[in-house]
Image: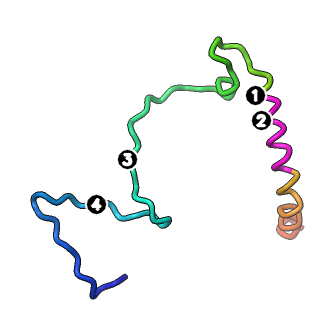
Amino acid sequence: MFPARPRPMPGPRQQRRMPPTPFGMPRMQQPQQQKRNRSVFAMFQTQEGSLDFDKISSTARQFNQIYHQVSPMVGPLLSKFFK
C-alpha cells in the first residue's frame, strides 16, 4: 500500500508480527479449547442439569424482538427477489 515506506527487516531477536485486522486490532491467537458435543438444550441448562425456563423464555423474547425489528426491512427485499 505504501511502497516507499521503509520496512524493518526481522532480525534474530525480532519476531515478525501478524498484520492487523481490517478493524485495526491485532490478531490474538485463540487458546485450544476442548471440543465437546453440546446440544441446543445444553445452553439452557442450569449447573444441576435441569432446564432453565427463565433463560429459554428470555431468549425467545429477544428473538421475537429482533424478528419484529428486522422483518420490515427484509420483507420488501425478499419479495423483490421471489416474485
**Mark 2 surroundings: few (<14), some (14-19) or many (≥20) residues within 10 A:** few
Q: Which residue is mark 2?
A: 59
Residue extending farthest to the top is 48
Q: Amino acid at mark 4?
A: Arg
Picture coordinates of residue 83 (x, y %)?
Answer: 90, 68
Secondary structure of residue under mark 1: helix
Answer with the quarter of the image where residue 75 lies.
bottom right
**Mark 3 surroundings: few (<14), some (14-19) or many (≥20) residues within 10 A:** few
Tell me if label 2 and label 3 are in contact, CB under 8 Å: no
Q: Amino acid at mark 3?
A: Gln
Q: Is residue 30 above or below residue 24?
A: above
Q: Which residue is mark 4?
A: 17
Q: Which residue is mark 3?
A: 29
Q: Amino acid at mark 2?
A: Thr
Picture coordinates of residue 76 (x, y %)?
Answer: 88, 66
Q: Is residue 33 above or below residue 66?
A: above
Earlier residue among tags 4 and 3: 4
Residue extending farthest to the left is 12
Q: Is residue 5 above or below residue 49?
A: below
Between 43 and 82, the residue placed more toward the observer is: 43
What number of labels is visible? 4
Q: Which residues are magenta?
A: 55-67
Q: Which residue is mark 1?
A: 55
